[in-house]
Amino acid sequence: MTERPMSSPTETRPLELRSLPGPFTALVLGASGTIGSAFVNTLSQMPSCARVVGLHRSSSPAIDLEREETLRDAAHRLADQGPFQLILDATGALTIDGVGPEKSLSQCKPQSLAKSFAINAVGRALVLKHFSQLLPKHGRSLFGVLSARVGSIEDNRLGGWYGYRASKAAGNMILQNAAIEIHRTKPEVVFAALQPGTVDSPLSAQFNKGHPLTSPRDAAEGLLMALDRLHAKGSAWFIDFRGEEIPW
């Protein structure tokens, strides 16, 4: 048997999700991305996390948001490993086919808009459809999905980014609908749309100028701690990595 070494008084204790009955099992979708991999790394170091499973396009099983059968099959294959007390959906797309967000109406193209919705909205619905079944039937559990502040209709003051803003707002509505429905049979599940801040990553580097950056680790840790403090309320939350609520 391998024993965990005792921490000295000067060592920083690892993060813990104190609201979940330990040991708990976690599932991260989009685990190969910047924030998804930070979630996996953070959870892997939690003493109370018995196992963390990460899924992405190249994992086994693999998932592809534009191919529902991959989501259905992955959820089916993981059923015997569940239930999962923590599920994190870190999937999504900012750049579509190598092109960044539209800055004006003149740049909007039907194909790009449709693909943004296919990934950020339809993909979210399919993730919730198949993977919410892996939540425990009884007891507290957490289901967090990556969102974005630009998906807030009320907070929109600059305009632009048509496809990304609209698809993220649609994804938020889908989460809200799912939270209301699932709460009827699983009232202790906490659902939350999570805004990680402006994360320092290669994918978003060209859009980060002038914004204070958050490291992937700090974003993941902040979101997990914020999610841990929420209570189940029969609908979804929309919060940032500091735990502050964002208007829908």
Image: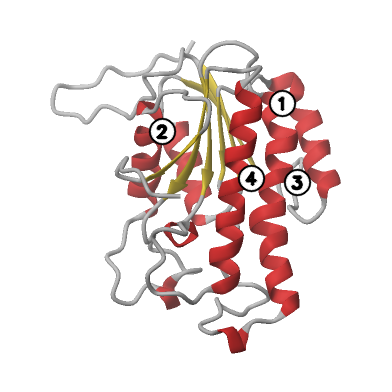
Q: Identify which amino acid the numbered label 3 is placed on.
A: Ala
Mark 1 or 4: the one toward you: 4
Residue 106 image-quadrant placement:
bottom right
Secondary element type, mark 2: helix
4 or 2: tag closer to the N-terminus: 4
**Horizontal relation, residue 109 to residue 139: left or right:** right
Q: Nearer the viewer, residue 205 or 147?
A: 147
Label 2 close to label 3 by CB (< 8 Å): no
2 or 3: tag closer to the N-terminus: 3
- Label 1: few (<14), some (14–19) or many (≥20) C-alpha neighbours in 10 Å: some
Mark 2 or 3: the one toward you: 2
Label 1 close to label 2 by CB (< 8 Å): no
Q: CA distance from mark 2 to mark 3?
A: 26 Å
User: Compared to 97, does 234 lie above or below?
Assistant: above
**Which percent across, then down, holds residue 243?**
32, 40
Q: CA distance from mark 1 to mark 4?
A: 16 Å
Residue 69 image-quadrant placement:
top right
User: Compared to 24, does 65 lie above or below?
Assistant: below
- Say which residue label 2 marks: 227
Residue at the farthest bottom position: 106
- Say which residue label 3 marks: 62
Secondary element type, mark 4: helix
Label 4 close to label 3 by CB (< 8 Å): no
Identify the disc placed on residue 133. Answer: 1
Q: Identify which amino acid the numbered label 1 is placed on.
A: Gln
Q: CA distance from mark 4 to mark 2?
A: 19 Å
